[in-house]
Image: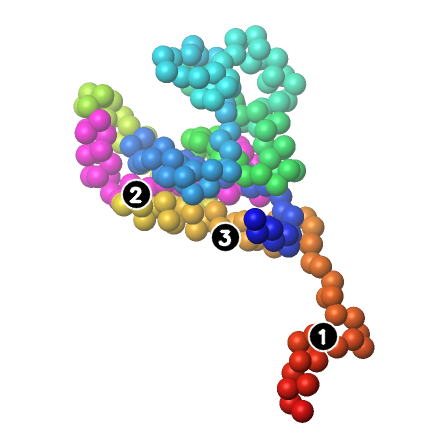
Amino acid sequence: MKARAPQLAKRQGIIFILSAPSGAGKTTLYNGLRKGYPDIQLSVSCTTRKQRRGEVAGRDYRFLSGRQFDALKERGEFAEWAQVHDYFYGTPCQPLDRAVKSGYDILLDIDVQGAKKIKSVYPQAVAVFVLPPSMAELERRLSARGTDDRQVIRRRLANARGEMQQIIHYDYFVVNRDVEQAVRVLSGIVEAERSRVSRVTEWRIEPLRAQRGQVSHEQRNQTSRSR
């Protein structure tokens, strides 16, 4: 089996933030990205809401009691947290710190408020906002779900307009007009950020094998052929 070439550099892990209005197709793009980059981990949020059918504890969420959530919050173990209706949601710091230090990339699926808080704690995080092609297309997608009534759809569209105004706080945007094309753009962002020199913590450049005063085998062959 062919030996794997040594890495030239050791880098920090990257925190990728992915935000989008409801119906923009964020989950579809994330799943497409993971096919090409299965090494990117997904941050698992904590929540005080009850586990739903089909959800797996530790994969979808860490389900906590109100007392457990408060204890973590008081110890400063959340990079960001928020109350949504009657429940609390939070992003634990430990997996993010571990990923950055160990050189693994991690992705956070959070809203604009959470993204702003994460960027304040981790300035090197990369925030990507997913846009629909148009508001008309977003409305069509929301209606096609068949899960919300007109009042809910109108509220989601109003929220989307407010969320899109926060795009100035993001590093990149991806327009999800065509899923394959959008995944390619998202993959390009991953490749570009992985190639940043500022993220390198250690260079592993091997010294030249040929020492001064020595002639390489190839040079000797060229000399003999010229005779």
User: Is 214 left or right of 195, judged from the image as shown?
Assistant: right
- Of label 2 and label 3, which has the lower sequence position? 2
Query: Label 2: which residue?
Result: 179
Within 10 Å of disc 1 (Cα), the crowding (few <14, some 14-19, many 20+) is few
What residue is at 37 percent from the left and 16 percent from the top? 54
- Which residue of the protein is positioned furthest toward the right in this rendering? 213
- CA distance for labels 2 and 1: 52 Å
Q: Which mark is residue 192?
A: 3
Q: Position of residue 43 (x, y in %)?
A: 51, 29
Q: Which residue is drawn at 21% across and 39% down?
A: 137
Q: Is residue 165 shown to the viewer in this render?
A: no
Neighbour tally class for label 2: few under 14, some 14-19, many 20 plus, Cα within 10 Å = some
Locate residue 208, reporting x and y percent: 73, 66
Question: Quick check: can you spot residue 42?
Answer: yes
Pointer 3 local density, CA inside 10 Å: few below 14, some 14–19, many at least 20: few
Query: Disc 2 or 1, which lies upstream in sequence?
Result: 2
Boundaries of the magenta span: 116-145
Q: Does the magenta stretch include residue 78?
A: no
Front position in the image: 139 or 169: 139
Secondary structure under the numbered disc 1 in the rendered image: loop
